[in-house]
Amino acid sequence: MRRPSMTVINLRQARKDRARVEKRAKGDENAAKFGRSKAETAQSRAEAELSARRLDGHHLDGGRAPGEGADD
């Protein structure tokens, strides 16, 4: 009769591998909830700056907010 060969495993390494997998899963879950890539963040920031400049450019008093003029 032939016995099936068993694989010897290092229990410490198995624990570390399992912890690594769990940590990765938790990180992926958090990234899906909260994360945005650097490119998405930069794009949002650029769009906000552009819209702010456009809004400031449409002021009738030359870009100053009300109450900031030299005539006040």
Image (tube, grey):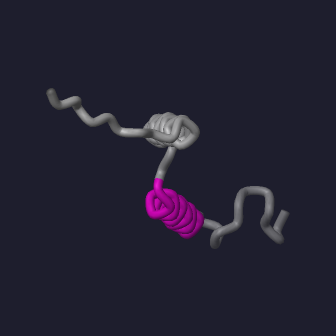
Stretch in magenta: 37-58
Residue closer to the observer: 69 or 11: 11
Identify which residue is drawn at 73% across, 57% down: 66
Q: Is residue 53 magenta?
A: yes
Identify which residue is drawn at 51% across, 41% down: 10
Relative side of 66 to 57, left or right: right
Relative side of 63 to 16, left or right: right
* Residue 56 pos. (x, y %): 59, 65
Identify which residue is drawn at 22% across, 31% down: 4
Q: Specify the farthest residue to the left.
A: 1
Quadrant (top left, top right, bottom left, bottom right) of the C terminus: bottom right
Residue closer to the observer: 70 or 32: 32
Identify which residue is drawn at 41% across, 39% down: 8
One can see residue 55 in this view: no
* Residue 38 pos. (x, y %): 50, 61
User: Does residue 22 sit above or below 37 in this rendering?
Assistant: above
Residue closer to the observer: 35 or 41: 35
Q: Is residue 42 magenta?
A: yes
Quadrant (top left, top right, bottom left, bottom right) of the N terminus: top left
User: Does residue 40 sit above or below 5 in this rendering?
Assistant: below
Q: What secondary structure do most residues of the magenta stretch adopt?
A: helix
* Residue 16 pos. (x, y %): 56, 41
> How many numbered marks appear?
0
Q: Specify the farthest residue to the top.
A: 1
Residue closer to the observer: 49 or 5: 5
One can see residue 66 in this view: yes
* Residue 40 pos. (x, y %): 45, 58
User: Does residue 49 sit above or below 30 in this rendering?
Assistant: below
Quarter location, residue 45: bottom right
